Image (spheres, grey):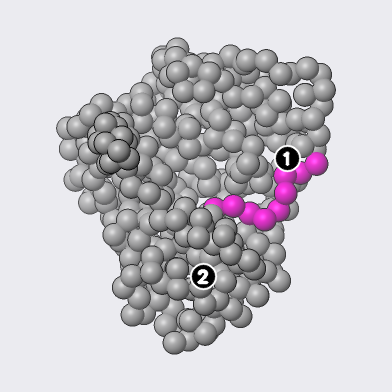
Amino acid sequence: MSQKILDNLSQRATSLQASKIREIAELGMKQDDVLPLWFGEGVWPTSDSIVNAAVESLCRGNHKYQPNNGAINLREQICQYSNQLLGCNLTTQRITITPSGMQGLMLCAQILASPGDKIVTIEPGWPNIVGAFSAAGANIESVSLNPVDGIWQLDTQTIIDKLTPDTKAVIINSPNNPTGWVMNKAQQLEILAHCRAHQIWIVADDVYSRLYRHGASAPSFLSIAQDDDLLISVNSFSKCWSMTGWRLGWIVAPAILEAKLGQLTEFNTSSTAGFVQDAGIVALRDGEQNVSQLLSQLDESYRFCAQQLSTFSRVEFIQPEGAFYCFFKVDGLTDSFAAAKQIMQETKVGLAPGIAFGEKGEGYLRLCYAQPLNVLDNAFQRLAPFLNK
């Protein structure tokens, strides 16, 4: 009977693949004393000022439905924040609030992709991006990042050649999860010009934009695009404001999509919780000190991890430009999923397997270093027997 139930699901649902990151995490959550470095989540809590803003909002009675596109005061705050940071000129009509960056990506898939549409992504890449567009029935093609002269690089001509006139959209996650690669401004200008000429959408996953190791923000398409370009930027409060569990994000899109995005939100979630949106206002308005503190902590943690990885002869590690991951190759490793399970069983350290990020990720493991030094030191002491084999 169970198989009959499964046979009656939609093709989109049955074709979806489970996240191998989540599979490792589910195994680890059933065990004691596991160091969970599998998710893109920092250990540090949300700041008191953000928490208090949500509590005060609830106490004021902010318990009701919100506008589909989000509360106007948060949309205004996002405009102010983005315009100052990126030098753009956003208006509230271009902002839609989403209950998480992931939901923002799902809205992009729903508004852009029809069954059979060609969507181009970058690999290695976060599997949920592919999952969202696959669930919308799109056909996914990928372009590979490659290590060249000790850094991750994307050949601009290779991706432009892939962006043929029959392409509906290209999804660019920069800074990239898992590699930390960042697309530079010159590449963005080339790709934007090509996509303008061929009417191809750009979906910019900007969730890690502030976790950039060389400035206040990674290069952004929003800084160079015109208001009516076929561009949607997806962002989130999860990472640099330590708000993963709050489920709050936003997208920037052409103003003409405001009504349609509102309709899709209505049919997905209706709206984002008002008290959570009030917390987001405080995060943007008063949270720069918290962001600076987090970046300082992450830099210290990164330097420690990079030094530790350099001590293992089997490990090849390429310095990331952004995000908060160490994505490292282990000599002789051919089944990263099996290795991640073995590592967790033998060392009680939870890592994400490279194959979770596409075929180009095989042979790699991903460690989220958004942890204090004592936890990371413990992790590497446990990992040493495996990495020294």
Height in image: 206 above or below 275?
A: below
Residue 62 in the image, given as x and y percentages of width and height: 74, 18
Residue 174 in the image, given as x and y percentages of width and height: 44, 48
Height in image: 79 above or below 45?
A: above
Of 367 and 340, the residue lying toward us:
340
Q: For the magenta stretch, what is the residue range?
A: 40-48
Per the rendering, the mark at residue 200 is none
How far is disc 2 from disc 1 in space, using C-alphas? Answer: 36 Å
Q: For the C terminus, which image quadrant?
A: bottom left
Amino acid type assigned to the residue bearing label 2 in the image: Met
Amino acid type assigned to the residue bearing label 1 in the image: Gly
Residue 304 in the image, given as x and y percentages of width and height: 62, 72
Q: Residues within 10 Å of mark 2 (few under 14, many from 20)?
A: many
Per the rendering, the mark at residue 287 is 1
Q: Quadrant of residue 30?
A: bottom right
User: What element does badge 2 sit on?
Assistant: helix
User: What element does badge 1 sit on?
Assistant: loop
Verify CB contact (< 8 Å) between mark 2 and mark 1. Answer: no
72 vs 45, left or right, is left
**Can residue 316 be seen in this snapshot?**
no
**Can residue 228 be seen in this snapshot?**
yes
